[in-house]
């Protein structure tokens, strides 16, 4: 193989394997909990996910991070179990309880041998219905999270993300992350936790998804045994509404600089608010993103890494959420190339908006990156359960995954360019830099955008 041949992409062969998502059987308990059953007899295991459609976006404005603290505490002690006893009880069943908090949902789940699923669901019921919420546990969880914040405050990527999402959404519900802030955590009381739990951990907001080697009637019986005693204490507060038009805009668009003296690299974010997961342009935007910065052979990676040697890698993504979203480019670049990197990113944003900007070969590679391996996301019981959790989170149709490959393959080059023209606006993008002002500020000011030094709150 010659040196020239090493830099020639191989031809794309074969075709994408279509997905046939398994049927979902739906039931419900009298208290409002929805039960989704997906029977798979391939291996004798089952995965369960309890999806509660409340998350960090439901934090009170003065208490960012409260959803995360509450989720941390529900399995510290519940019913007759303290934290160690509860962990041991799950371990004796060959599993563990995993709790995750996102902006839109909170999930609690486990994967176990199918015959142990009923017993594990009973433990999950204890966590949901009878959490103890002891003051000593709050003190320990608070200290762990404060320690985590101290660690994150020294991570350039964490600082960049905080500043970026605050720039895009400001005080709106998507403007903060799950971990919260030191000020909020320090002020959080057990009364705050109990009130948030009572208002948001509601059976009417919950869907239990069980995928695996269990029959529908077995799943419903086990769910009823575990969760039928769960009762709401009230209707819960109304949810905040976030729309893309609510985001904070800079006029003219700003560059926000977090000073890290002596840093040899700059952490960079460039982007804007974007659409929610419900957008009709979903497949077009994924295809567009793959061309622009969503894969290794994308335009931005070719320019910044291969041609100019400014970074080891660059990535763009549409962060689709239930009520809104964001579009962002993420990269780390050598400090003296910070201004050039942002200039190139904005130039590529502008170039891809022009009529005829995307060629057929480029489009084919983008589609292949999205579709050729898509089927591998639905191989295990856990993957099937998590796919169902997406349907719950965003209120999507059952054929969402079946239609994905066809949806991507139906995108034309002009479709992708039209999506860029609608959703990518370089003239209003916020740019965030975490780096050494001595190495990058002059170059940033030369971009013609006001440079504001900011300090993210941790």
Image (cartoon, rainbow, N blue to C red):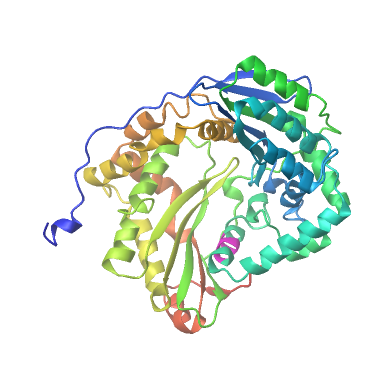
Give the residue at the far front of this rendering.
92
Q: Judge whether 203 appears above or below 71 on screen.
A: above
Please identify the quadrant where the C terminus is shown.
Answer: bottom right
Looking at the picture, tell me which residue is in the foreground, 27 or 260.
Answer: 27
Which span of residues is magenta-colored?
Answer: 160-164
Looking at the picture, tell me which residue is in the foreground, 309 or 2.
Answer: 2
Instruction: Tell me which secondary structure the magenta stretch mostly adopts.
Output: helix
Q: Judge whether 142 appears above or below 35 on screen.
A: below
Q: Residue at x 35, y 65 (%)?
A: 344
Give the residue at the far bottom of this rendering.
438
Query: Is 6 on the left or on the right of 199, as rendered?
Result: left
Q: Residue at x 14, y 62 (%)?
A: 3
Q: Residue at x 39, y 50 (%)?
A: 294
Looking at the picture, tell me which residue is in the foreground, 206 or 40.
Answer: 40
Please identify the quadrant where the N terminus is shown.
Answer: bottom left
Give the quarter of the image for residue 203: top right
Q: Residue at x 77, y 34 (%)?
A: 202
Looking at the picture, tell me which residue is in the foreground, 372 or 446.
Answer: 372
Number of numbered discs overlaid on the protein picture: 0
Q: Judge whether 35 appears above or below 15 on screen.
A: above
Residue 89 visible in the current orientation: yes
Q: Judge whether 162 appears above or below 34 on screen.
A: below
Query: Is 83 on the left or on the right of 345, as rendered?
Result: right
Is residue 135 rendered magenta in the image?
Answer: no
Percent x, y of residue 146: 73, 64
Give the residue at the far top of this rendering.
217
Percent x, y of residue 391: 56, 31
Percent x, y of residue 54: 70, 40
Percent x, y of residue 24: 56, 20
Residue 76 visible in the current orientation: no
């Amino acid at each position: 193989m010659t040196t020239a041949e090493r830099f020639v992409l191989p031809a794309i062969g074969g075709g994408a394997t279509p997905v046939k998502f398994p049927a979902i059987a739906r039931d419900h308990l009298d208290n409002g909990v929805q039960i989704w059953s997906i029977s798979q007899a391939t291996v004798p295991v089952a995965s369960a996910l309890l999806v509660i459609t409340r998350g960090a976006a439901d934090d009170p404005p003065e208490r960012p991070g409260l959803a995360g603290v509450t989720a941390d505490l529900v399995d510290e002690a519940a019913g007759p179990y303290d934290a160690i006893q509860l962990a041991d009880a799950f371990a004796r069943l060959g599993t563990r309880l995993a709790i995750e908090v996102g902006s839109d949902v909170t999930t609690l789940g486990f994967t176990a041998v199918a015959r142990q699923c009923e017993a594990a669901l009973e433990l999950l019921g204890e966590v949901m219905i009878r959490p103890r919420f002891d003051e000593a546990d709050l003190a320990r969880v608070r200290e762990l999270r404060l320690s985590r914040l101290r660690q994150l405050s020294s991570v350039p990527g964490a600082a960049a993300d905080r500043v970026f999402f605050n720039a895009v959404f400001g005080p709106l519900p998507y403007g903060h992350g799950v971990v919260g802030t030191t000020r909020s955590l320090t002020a959080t009381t057990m009364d705050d936790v109990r009130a948030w739990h009572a208002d948001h951990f509601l059976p009417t907001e919950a869907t239990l998804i069980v995928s695996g080697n269990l029959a529908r009637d077995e799943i419903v019986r086990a769910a009823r045994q575990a969760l039928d005693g769960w009762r709401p204490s009230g209707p819960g507060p109304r949810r905040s509404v976030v729309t893309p038009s609510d985001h904070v805009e800079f006029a003219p668009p700003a560059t926000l600089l977090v000073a890290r003296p002596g840093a040899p690299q700059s952490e960079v974010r460039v982007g804007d608010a974007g659409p929610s997961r419900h957008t009709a342009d979903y497949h077009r935007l994924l295809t567009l993103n793959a061309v622009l910065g969503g894969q290794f052979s994308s335009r931005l990676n070719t320019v910044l890494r291969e041609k100019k040697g400014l970074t080891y890698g660059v990535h763009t993504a549409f962060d689709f959420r239930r009520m809104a979203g964001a579009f962002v480019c993420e990269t780390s670049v050598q400090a003296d190339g910070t201004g050039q990197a942002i200039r190139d990113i904005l130039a590529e944003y502008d170039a891809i908006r022009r009529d005829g900007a995307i060629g057929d070969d480029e489009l084919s590679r983008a589609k292949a990156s999205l579709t050729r391996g898509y089927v591998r996301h639905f191989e295990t019981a856990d993957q099937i359960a998590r796919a169902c959790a997406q349907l719950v989170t965003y209120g999507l149709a059952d054929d969402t995954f079946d239609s994905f490959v066809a949806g991507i393959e139906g995108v034309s080059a002009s479709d992708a360019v039209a999506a860029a023209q609608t959703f990518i606006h370089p003239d209003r993008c916020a740019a965030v830099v975490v780096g050494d002002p001595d190495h990058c500020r002059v170059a940033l000011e030369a971009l013609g955008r006001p440079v504001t030094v900011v300090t993210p709150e941790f």
